[in-house]
Image (tube, rainbow, N blue to C red):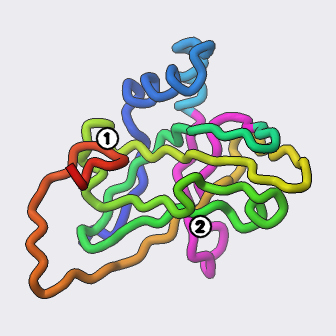
Amino acid sequence: MLTAKFEKVSFSQYLKAMKSFDSELTDNDIKTIYDSIQLPRRATKGSAGYDFFTPVDIDLKPSETITLPTGIRVQMNESWVLFLLPRSGLGFKFRMQLNNTVGVIDSDYYYSDNEGHIFAKITNDTNENKTISIPKGNGFIQGIFLTYGITEDDDANAVRNGGFGSTDQ
């Protein structure tokens, strides 16, 4: 029985996403970044969250926002959801926030045209004029798997194809 499995998206998917993220990166630069992507993992056996590691150095000045392609996708049970949250220390020390407050990755996102590529839109919401610096390979968000229920009269039968806003079209 499948529980969940993190994977990298294909290189072609990552290349496309990273070209949008930083148009100055060469294909070789992106291949080097792609090859170094770490799959999310828990730090300790008591950790609820799977740490996602930034594939590039991040420096966010106060009020700056970036949308970072993680290079990660996840296959999970149909009755599971992955919630994404800032790592506690970054939120507490720097007020780093996810722009949608909590990222919700549904099980069927894995099958989308973009391969279920998980992006993180993060903002430095400091009120202390602090810059957030996260070196490549450090954890920056965490994912927590939860199961969910449905109502007795649930009749959802649409098929997802896309990310933001795709389920209400």
User: Pointer 2: residues within 10 angstroms few (<14), some, or many (20+)?
Assistant: some
User: Which of the 4 image quadrants contains residue 66?
Assistant: top right
User: Which of the 4 image quadrants contains residue 147?
Assistant: bottom left
In the displayed structure image, the side of residue 114 where residue 125 appears, left or right: right
Q: Decide which of tag 2 and tag 1 comes sooner along the chain.
A: 2
Q: What's under tag 2, amino acid-wise?
A: Arg
Provide the residue designation for mark 1. Answer: 115
- Please give the label number shown on residue 42: 2
User: Pointer 1: residues within 10 angstroms few (<14), some, or many (20+)?
Assistant: many
Q: Position of residue 71 (x, y in %)?
A: 48, 39
Q: Residue at x 81, y 46 (%)?
A: 132
Q: Residue at x 56, y 61 (%)?
A: 101
In the displayed structure image, the side of residue 148 where residue 48 appears, left or right: right
In the displayed structure image, the side of residue 32 where residue 12 appears, left or right: left
Q: Nearer the viewer, residue 75 or 119?
A: 119
The secondary structure type at the circle numbered 2 is: loop
The secondary structure type at the circle numbered 1 is: loop
Q: Position of residue 85 (x, y in %)?
A: 58, 63
Q: CA distance from mark 2 to mark 1?
A: 23 Å
Q: Is residue 113 above or below residue 4?
A: above
Q: Which residues are magenta?
A: 36-58
Q: What's under tag 1, amino acid-wise?
A: Glu
Q: Residue at x 20, y 49 (%)?
A: 169
